[in-house]
Every structure is written in C-alpha cells, then in structure tokens.
Image (spheres, rainbow, N blue to C red):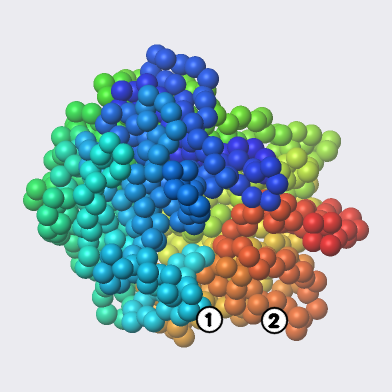
Amino acid sequence: MAIPRVLSLRLSPDGSRLISAVQSLNADGKSYGTALWAIPVGGREGEPYRLTRSAKGEAGAVFTDSGDVLFTSARPDPTVKDSADEVASLWLLPRAGGEARQVATRPGGIGAVRTAGDVVVFAADVLDGEADTEEERRKARKDAGISAVLFEGYPVRYWDHDLGPGRTRLFAGRLGEDRLEDVRDLTPDAGEALRECGFELTPDGATVVVTWRTYLPKGEWRTDLVAIDVATGERRVLLSEDRHDFTGPLAISPDGRRVACSRERFTGLDVSARSELWIADLATGQGRAYAPDLFPAAVEWAPDSSAVHLAADHQGRRPVFRVSVAGPGDVARLTRDDASYSNLAVSADGRALYALRSGVGIVPGPARIDVANGEVADVPSPAPRPEVPGTLTEISATADDGTTIRGWLVLPERASAGAPAPLLLWVHGGPIASWNDWQWRWQAWIMAAHGYAVLMPDPCLSTGYGQEMIDRGWGNWGPRTQADLDAIVDVALARDDIDAERIGAMGGSYGGYMANWLAGHSDRYKAIVTHASLWNLDQFAGTTDAAMFWQREFGEPGSERYSLLSPHNSLDKITTPLLVIHGDKDYRVPIGEALRLWWDLRRTEVEAKFLYFPDENHWILKPGNAVAWYETVLAFLAQHVLGEEWKRPGSVA
C-alpha cells in the first residue's frame, strides 16, 4: 500500500525531461495523494525531483510548446481571499521555475486538457442553460437540497458515479500572460455526446478531434470521430460507420494530416469483440485498418509521420510495434523483452521512445527504448522498484481442442520438491484482457510472500493471441473457459514444487463469474474467493451500467444463453467454501449480484462469508479497505486451503 505509484508519462518539447504523476500514501495512511515529478532525460540525466505539493494533489499534466506545464488541481488559489475550491481548476507551472498560478476555472471543474501553440482545449462539466449563470444555478440547486436528476435517455450512471445533472463540453482559449483568455464553448449543443470522450489537438491548434456519441434506438449508441474547428466551433463528422465505434487511444500525426485511433466492431450473438488500429486522413476521412490482430493499447506517431508506434497485448506481454503507414501489414516488433509498455512518448529526433515499463513482476517505471534496435534501458524513477518475493515462470498447456493455453506462475521463494507450495488459480477480469502487467489491486506477490504459488492464465477470450482465441469463448463463457483453465491447472499441479492437494481459486469481475462457475462445476478447489462477481445473468443484464454491450453477446434477457451460462443455476451443486466480496458503489456489476448470491448461499449448507464494502466500487481502492481485503482473503484461504483454524482479521473485527 505504501509503495509510490508512477501513473503517467509526458515528454517535454525539447526532450530534456519527462513529467509523471506519482500517487503516494498520505501521512494519515487512509488515503492517497498525487504530485507531479520531473525526470531529467536526453543526455541531461539526473535524479527525479518533485514539482508540486498540495493537499488536493495534481493530475492531467501536459507541456505547452514553450515547456511550461499545465495541470489540473482542486487546490485553493492563494491569490483569492478565502478561496476554497472544491472542483479542479487549470494551473500553469512556469518552465523557468516559481509558483504555479491558476489560469482557468469552471463551476463544474476542469477535466482533460490539450494544448498546441497558445491554444488550450479542455473538457468541463456544464449544466444546461446559459454559461454565465451556471454558478448561480449550481448554488441554488445545492442550497435547495436537490439531488434529483431527470433522464430522458440511457445511461444514468457509470462505473462508480451517477451521471448528471451536468454534461461534458469542450472549451477553447488562448494562453495569456496571467490567465487563459478568450475562453469559449466549442460544443454548446453536445448534450450527452461527450460522455467519457477522448480528444486531441492538431499540432497547429486549429482543430480538435474528439470521440462523439451518436445515440440510437433501444438504448444503443455508436461512437463516431468528429473534427471541430477551434476558431469557429464548426463541426464535421470525420469517421462514422454503422455498427462500429471509433475510440481511443487517439493520436494525430505531427504533419497534421492523419489520425490514428481504434475501430471496434459491434458485437452480436455470433460476432465477437474485435479492435484494430485505424489510420485515417484528417481532410477526407478516408482510412483503413492496420496491424491485424493487435488490439491498440497506446499509440504514438513517429516525428516524420511515416509510422505509428503501437503498444498491444501479445503472448502475455505488451510489446511496442512499429506500424508503417505505407501498408497495413508492414508491422515490426520493436521491444523483445517480457515487459508491458504504456504512455508512449517519442523524442523530437525520433531516435528514442519513452514509456512506462512494467510487467507481472515489474513495478511500473520510466524507460527509454532505442527505436533503431529496440534496446531498452530503465530511466531513474520517482518511485522505487522493489524486488518481488519469489520467481516468475511461464507455463503452457494444450486444451481439449488443441489450442495452446499459456500463463504466468508466481512461485514463492521457498517452493521446492521438498516443500511444495499451495496453489491459487487467479482468473483475470474483462474477459477481453490478459495477465501481462503489474497489478496494484490484485497483487499476486503478496500471496507469494505468504507462501502461495499463484497461477495467472490467459484462457479463451484473452487478448494477445489472435482473433480466434476470442472467438473460441464468445457466447460460451463458462464451459469453454473452464476447459482451458482445467488444462493449465493440470500442468501446474504436475510440478513437484506445487502441492496438488492444497488448491484454491479466485477471480474478480469476469474472473468472479468464473469463480462462481467453478464453484458449481468443480470440486477440485478447497476454497473459492469471488469478487465483484456475476451470479444471476438475467438479473445482471439490465442493471449493469452499460447493458447494451452485455445484451449484444447474450441477447435479450430470458434467452437461452442466460439459462445455459448463469452460475446461479448450479447453486445446488456448490459444496466448496466461498468468500463473497463486493462494493456497494459498483455499478459495473451491481451489488444486487452479491446480495442475491449471499441470500442463495444462506439457503444451502455451504460454508460462506461475505466481505462487504459500503464505500467502494468495482475494485477496493482505499488503503485501509485494501488491507482488510488482503487480510480477510488470507485468513479464509488459511482456514480452507491450509487447514488452519479460522482467525477473524483484526481489520474487520
């Protein structure tokens, strides 16, 4: 919990320093704070140094062309008497040094920021109505004690927060000596179109390219890409295709001619998820797919606009690839190590690519990639990179249909033939995902420190193994995934350093669904931990925060797939002890799933416990709650996998 976390990476225009947002445990031990750190690079290497300090923290940092830093923070403005800002404002930290100054505010706060030249574009939450009366209207609503929101469309909430009454708009202004000047609303008619939007500015600051939701009948929506003229606010549709979304990551070429994004097809009963790199002409909208079978995770253009650097899942890693715009199949892998890369940033001369480098056994930190030969060197990090307590081994198995299933096996330091370690199967969420990165929420090395081996497999529906791997499990979550898991668990249990008699299973989200499925379809596990899990699929289908994505794959509630694949239909076959974990603020998998599971288990003789977090979302993020999570999971596993006496953790006493 106390290890500082490097969250982001940006490179200055002159290539002399990186800037990172670093999250650290606050002195009270009950919360986290963020601060901006500078990392000297480009021949000027030195120790990282802290740039900002405030109780509210800082985020969203971007460089201006002159090397100043723009960031957002809810810190009070020291130049305003009795200032007590509760929402994030825009601040500027001069390159030459000195104190940061507030340059823009909005009654609903300021979100993401982009800049080019002296142009700044930012997102803000806005109430419907005239902008110059918004502050008064917000105050009147608060003073009247009104929390109600009237909806006429879908969705009504997202992840862990309720939507409305404000809606996202984009604003543009110009950097003056002291403030952002000539601030104007670029999207006064956006309505709900900019929910969760991503946007980028062209290098000349003339055009902003933004994802734009087009709402369709029956609660559906499609995400288009639109171009907005910063000077006039004129908007034109750039990319739009029936039954496809154009989404982030977004990147505009340095010559201002092309945009790189992700094109995702609508799924269906027999149409699986597919995401592909899409590069289009900014003037005409003409484009095509590149790098088949690589789901884009991060994109960064080469300085001469001839290629895109792409980070994408691949065989349990996330390498960087070079994708030439000359041809859709002209793809070369740049990095060859076992790491996963994100937050790409290229030097002005194109020789170096900076990124956050991490992995299952590697805490995220900045690294430099030589574009010519792919050699990687770590850069001094503002956060320590601790050693992990054990070893990481790659294993694979052959499933019943001949498919190779691979995964990572975390082994504790003392595991050997003479002292075999108990095994924990951890099923990843998603399900369109992969175990290839460091985890701050489900940390296998904590379990290894307590003597457990942890198997982290990539079964069907995992990314990085081609489209066929996703197709295999589409609409067949439980049986197909279990067959893959059984195959690789068998391989792990055959090792002489693994104790085949002491085995447990865990999973969160989709992994929680599989934990529930395994509970009703297998008796090999001594204990199962099911976190934020799907239990009754028909119930879940209309209560999750984005029901349309779910129902595209499973159909209308009540259809055959629900009855075939819902774990609750196997309640009478569950005998394995279960630890149920859920947060009340989880809107992705609503608390009703855990409440129904817990009630159903009360009607059986299954030994079970329910760890409930009234103030947490899909994941358990607050430090104290996270400690309680680990302590309770370890106590439960000790009781049922290790055969020890149950000891109620002090953190939940």
State which quadrant residue 291 falls in: top left
Say how many tags the image has.
Answer: 2
Q: Locate the C terminus by quadrant.
A: bottom right
Residue highlighted by disc 1: 539
Answer with left or right where residue 614 lies relative to residue 639. left
Give the amino acid type for the residue marked by disc 1 in the picture.
Gln
Seen in the picture, residue 169 relative to 72 is either above or below; the reply is below
Q: Mark 1 to mark 2: distance in Å?
A: 14 Å
Residue highlighted by disc 2: 600
Rendered residue at 37%/80% (across/down): 151
Give whichever of 62, 484 is nearer the camera.
Answer: 62
Q: Position of residue 145 (x, y in %)?
A: 51, 78
Instruction: Give the SS element for disc 2.
Output: helix
Looking at this rendering, what residue extends furthest in the left direction? 284
Q: Where is residue 181 in the image (x, y as percent from the top left)?
A: 24, 46
Instruction: Give the SS element for disc 1.
Output: helix
Q: Position of residue 107 (x, y in %)?
A: 38, 60
The reply to whether callout 1 and callout 2 are in contact (CB within 8 Å) is: no
Seen in the picture, residue 541 relative to 423 is either above or below; the reply is below
Answer with left or right where residue 4 lies relative to residue 587. right
Give the amino acid type for the residue marked by disc 2 in the picture.
Asp
Query: Is residue 278 among what the camera can see?
Result: no
Seen in the picture, residue 641 relative to 605 is either above or below; the reply is above
Rendered residue at 78%/74% (across/down): 606
Query: Is residue 383 among what the camera can see?
Result: yes
Looking at this rendering, what residue extends furthest in the top direction? 43
Rendered residue at 39%/81% (across/down): 150
